[in-house]
Image (spheres, rainbow, N blue to C red):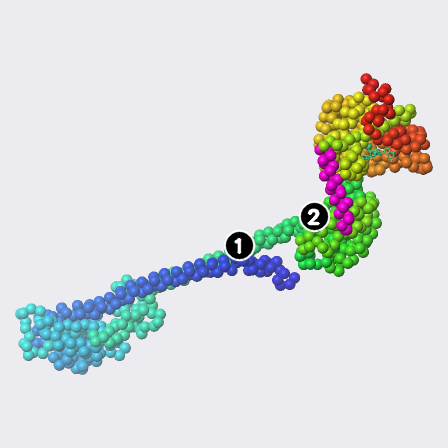
Amino acid sequence: MSFMTHPVLRRLSFTLKARHFWPVILLLLACFGSVLFLIALTTRAQDGLEQQREQQAVEGAVRTLAVGVQHDLQDYAKWDDAVRHISMGLQPGWVDDNVVAYLGRIQGYEDIFILNGRDETIYSFRHPQAPAHAAQETLGPAFTRSIDEVRKMPREGSPIEAGFSRQGNRIVTYSTAAIVPLTPKVSIPADHPTFMLVIAHAIDAPTLARITQELRLSTVQLSLAPPEPSSASVALKGTDGTTLGWLAWAPHQPGTRLLRQVAPAIVALGLLSVAAAILIFQNNSRTIEALRQSELRARHHAGHDSLTGLPNRRTLLSQISAHLAAGDDLTLLFMDLDGFKDANDVYGHAAGDLLLKEAAARVRSIAQGELVARAGGDEFAVLLSRDMARDADCICENIIRSFEAPFVIGAYRVTLGISIGCADAADVGPEGQDELMRRADVAMYAAKGDGKNCTRKYAVNLDEGHLLRMKLERDLQASIAGKELYVHYQPIVASDNARIVAVEALVRWRHPEHGDVPPDVFIPIAELSGLINAVGRQVLYQACLAMRETALELAVNISPVQFWDHNLLDDVRHALQETQFPPERLELEITESLLLRRPDKAAQVINRLRELGVRIALDDFGTGYASIGYLQRLKLDRIKIDKAFVAPLSRDARSREMMLSIVALANAFDAEVTAEGVETEEQARIARAAGCTRMQGWHFGRPTSVEELCAALGPEAQSHPA
Ligand code: C2E
Ligand code: MG
Ligand code: MG
């Protein structure tokens, strides 16, 4: 199995090629992308808000830090006792007990300095022997500048300053204040230098931890580190605005954190949607594929015959028009099987189907590569294009020859012929498909008319026969409507005394233009066109009426078409009632062929007719397929042996034997036998000797008008023996 022939891959490739697949996938991705974009926006906004809150909180804490130091210092600097014990003469012991005890030991200020009027350190908490510039060296330049700032301020205003300063890696928050009296009880002379009290503590890890705790920002981890792109920070600035350092922390990003938590679910959801879309499309594509297949099948069925698998008439016509439009040389062979209908009746429809299949196969094997179609019931067509059109004669001959071998259907060997009509498209024009079909059809009918199992080529003169047929049909219809058909009666005699005991009604049609048209010509036309029922009704009515006053029995022919017509029973009943003709004098002649098709149903119809009181005769016995089985199953009153058996009686011993057998057979089934077509005395003698109880033929009288018949009968036969 090659790579792309794997069914799953094929289906996937079909899915990918599906018209709506990519648009839907793109739409899904666009939706998914929009959702992600919105989530990202929300995340950013949430992170931004949180960062802003943290920033404000830390900035506030930084401000509070300096303010707190100032606040701690101001009460100690503005204090009458401090002026007395520091400015008016430094008493280190007092300082230790009253200032350092609280600020240094309890509040935790690491640096506590006292500066004299020359900014010299005269007291240091941590280093009692500190040098003069210990405070400046410990706390750094920002602090040093603050001393000047404080000195510039008027003493009455209790000068104080606080801020941040840096020395080396140490950043401190400090406060510097002039030591001034709180109350007027103590005063400092104007020329007395101002002493300063300084406190500071380093911003170190414990300080930062305290800030964080006070801020209630458990997630913020402050550090004194230069800011990084991913971190948040607040600058610690000196009083002159220079940056001394940074308080940095990794900002809390609740949006991002949430996104990280839900991201796998979102991605999974997106993948699931795409997978679902693919599945739905695969499913759809499977449905579409099934529909496509069934459409292909439906199209094939619409264009093909289901029995033989051949293209049907529709396909044939469209192929013809395509070739005609392309201006191709084209020859159409139109063929009809000879003897198929009878075989179908005899052997049944299943056998008929097999015959059609085999016939189709034989035609196809000859016309390989050309379009072979089933044009109708037992009609086939071959469309010969281009070069093959020139070989039409040869192909027709081969097709006819291919039908010489009998068709073997189960235990039967059936011989069929094929009549072929051949027409070429030389002058039918680009839209002449119907005309081409008509010509081939006319030619095929000509082949049938010329004895079947042969080929006829279309020629204009053939149209005449065809047109004549159509004209006959129209004229027959008019004659029926004008009740112009009339009936002749042929005598039927009793064999023992040759007296006329019955007549057969035989329809006659005399047309002003066509003259006398024989029933053998117009009855088939009437049967094919459906006019036969009207003909039959008229004959039955006329004959019953004409024979009512005679003592003769009346035989009336019933065509197979009439027999199967569901109005037959009513027609017979109606004619009998209308004419008051006694049913027991009426005999209906049916033919063998109709017994073959649906014999059970035929038996039913026959029984119903018999219930009306009429009798049934089997006409033309011996020409068809009647079997002993049928004779046994059906209740027949009479068998009429066809003239084909009677004619050779005087010269052929075998036909005499046959007649004897038929009579014996009929008698076994309680049927009488009539010999038809008796033309000579000898035939009459043999038939009589064979046991035929009645005879009919020119020897006893030709079909004649009722008047002539009555004249021949003489007065005694004209009235019914009441
Ligand atoms: P059929 O029923 O077998 O009628 C007998 C045919 O044999 C008649 O031909 C008759 O004229 C002819 N015939 C009678 N005796 C002889 C004879 O000694 N020698 C020869 N050669 N022929 C003889 P017709 O009248 O031409 O009828 C032909 C067929 O037309 C009938 O055959 C019947 O099948 C059919 N037909 C005639 N009239 C009607 C009708 O009213 N209805 C139907 N359905 N069929 C009819
Ligand atoms: Mg007859
Ligand atoms: Mg007959």
Residue 26: percent from the left, percent from the top? 48, 60
Q: Is residue 243 left or right of residue 195?
A: right
First of labels 2, 1 by sequence position: 1
Amino acid type, residue under disc 1 in the picture:
Ile
Residue 397 sits inside the magenta stretch: no
Q: Using the numbered discs, state the Cα–Cα distance from disc 2 to disc 1 in whole angstroms.
A: 36 Å
Residue at numbered disc 2:
306
Q: Secondary structure at mark 2?
A: loop
From the viewer's side, name the closer residue of 148 and 582.
582
Place residue 195 in its image quadrant. bottom left
Location of mark 1 (residue): 280
Could you tell me which residue is drawn at 18 percent across and 72 percent down? 162
If the image is split into quadrants, where does the N terminus sit? bottom right
Q: Which residue is painted at 61% across and 58% down in the image?
A: 7
Rendered residue at 76%/30% (across/down): 539
Instruction: In the rendered view, tell whether residue 332 sits above or below residue 601.
Output: below
Q: Do the CB atoms of the residues marked 2 and 1 lie less than 8 Å apart?
A: no
- Within-10-Å neighbours for mark 1: few <14, some 14–19, many 20+: some
